[in-house]
Image (tube, rainbow, N blue to C red):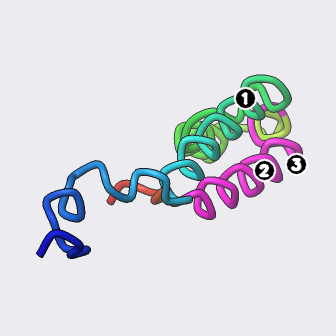
Amino acid sequence: MRGSSTGASACSPTSGNNTPGRRVTPAAAALCVFVTRTFFRGSEGSGIPQVIAVLHSPTTEAGSHLLTMRILLSKIAVSLVAILGGFTIGRE
């Protein structure tokens, strides 16, 4: 049994640490944080408070400041990167 491939090392909790998923998720998180903080200020968070503020605003002027096309597109792009990186989106 000396040459057997089944041993204690095969069941080690550290075996498989070099799988791509263990590197992709942290890299996706770092990329999302970097892009959001560097290029898309104001797009942090879920956006639900901004939508509520626009809906309760007496004028539509608040919408142009809180919900811009730039913020909308950045949320879609960063969310896509997060999903592809293995994150879940929402309050699950």
Q: Residues within 10 Å of mark 2 (few under 14, many from 20)?
A: few
Q: Residue at x 80, y 32 (%)?
A: 40
Front label number (2 vs 1): 1
Q: Residue at x 63, y 42 (%)?
A: 27
Q: Are marks 3 and 2 in contact (CB under 8 Å)?
A: yes
Looking at the image, tell me whether mark 2 or mark 1 is earlier in sequence order. 1
Q: Which residues are magenta?
A: 65-85
Numbered label attached to residue 72: 2
Which kind of residue does numbered mark 2 sit on? Leu
Numbered label attached to residue 80: none
Q: CA distance from mark 1 to mark 3?
A: 20 Å
Numbered label attached to residue 69: 3
Which kind of residue does numbered mark 1 sit on? Phe
Q: Depth check: 80 or 40 in front?
A: 80
Looking at the image, tell me whether mark 1 or mark 3 is earlier in sequence order. 1
Quarter of the image for residue 67 reads top right
Front label number (1 vs 3): 1
Q: Residues within 10 Å of mark 1 (few under 14, many from 20)?
A: few
Of the 4 image quadrants, the one containing the C terminus is: bottom left
Magenta highlight: main SS: helix
From the image, tell me which residue sits under label 1.
Answer: 34
